Amino acid sequence: MSGELRITHAHGDRVTVTEPVTGVQLFAYVYRPEAAWEAPRPYLHPIRTLTGDVVTDYRPNDHRWHKGLSLTASHLSGANLWGGNSYIHDQGYLAIPERVGSMRHLGFEELSSAEGRLVIAERLTWHPYDGTLWAEEQRRIEVHDVAPDSGSWALTWTSAITNRRDEPLLFGSPTTAGREQAGYTGLFWRGPRAFRDGRIIGPEGEGPELMGSQSPWLALSGEHDGADGHATVLFEHAPENDHSGAGGTHPAHWFVRNDPFAGIAPSWAFYDELELAPGDTLRRRYRVVIANGAWERADIAKYLEAHPW
């Protein structure tokens, strides 16, 4: 790669990252507050491939609160930091504005680009509707392994969320609240409308039946509108996530669908609530790879072998 990834900071609004060889803006990290009903929080959109094709959606008409790639909590001790209607067992999704909370940007601790690696390090706070401080987050997004020749680039997302309440924080999902196969919470990617019916690929299986499954990685490939070709979005757990729960951590399961939209979330609390005691910190790290083309399982395995943690 010739030259370093470029950072442009529009203060109070967003940070954009540009790849110097192709001139493509890889993403914008938007941290300005947005509509209260949509649970204001920072997000990445648009995210682009190295050929400039967009692989995220923003405020789609079916879920206005879906915004690119963001980390959020659908059910948090009775609050909704996901946005939109709240799921209530035996009643369905209801408009309950006083449940909808927010995340607030406090400041950047680092914005740097050197030796082929770009860092966005941020401090945030988490709040229910009344603005009370419930949690503090240290977030670090690193862009790396940018390879114009092979058409892929990667980011690593690390979040450390500390409970600042005097009582436990309970992370849940619509499934923990009683709705089957709706365990969404945590880091969530909303794909573009063209990726509906895209191909879902896991290490040992394919298709929507991977909803609620466990594995180190999961990918979805789709075909672009307006441009010839496909792209693949790959999510991978860092080893310390212990996604299976075998080492004593809370297990993670994949929320994934390609109908009625394309989306992936390595859910923190698919089947069971995750309890975070006062003063304790929840740490999770993920890699997200954005690649040109419709990668096969063998292509993904080859990439991961060549790029170990």
Image (cartoon, rainbow, N blue to C red):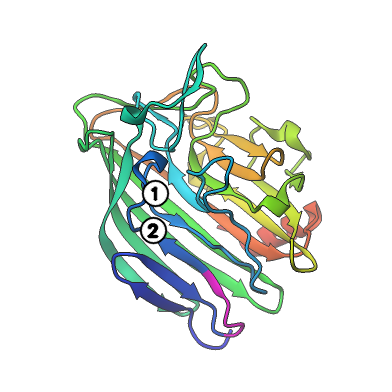
Compared to 101, does 233 lie above or below?
Answer: below
217 displayed left or right of 128: right
What's under tag 2, amino acid-wise? Answer: Arg
Magenta segment, which residues? 21-26
Query: Where residue 306 sits: x, y (%)?
Result: 67, 64
Compared to 8, does 105 lie above or below?
Answer: above
**Which quarter of the figure has residue 280?**
top left
Check if mark 2's residue and mark 1's residue have beta carbons within 8 Å: yes
Mark 2 Cα shell of 10 Å, populated few (<14), some (14-19), many (≥20): some
Q: Nearer the viewer, residue 72 or 113?
A: 72
Residue at the (49%, 14%) spot, across then down: 89
Could you tell which of marks 2 and 1 lies nearer the N-terminus? Answer: 2
Compared to 307, does 283 lie above or below?
Answer: above
Distance in Å between CA atoms under marks 2 and 1: 7 Å
Residue 159's tag is 1
What's under tag 1, amino acid-wise? Answer: Ser
Residue 140's tag is 2
200 displayed left or right of 309: right
Compared to 112, does 180 lie above or below?
Answer: above
Residue at the (55%, 57%) spot, across then down: 309
Q: Nearer the viewer, residue 203 or 239?
A: 203
What kind of element bears circle 1?
Answer: strand
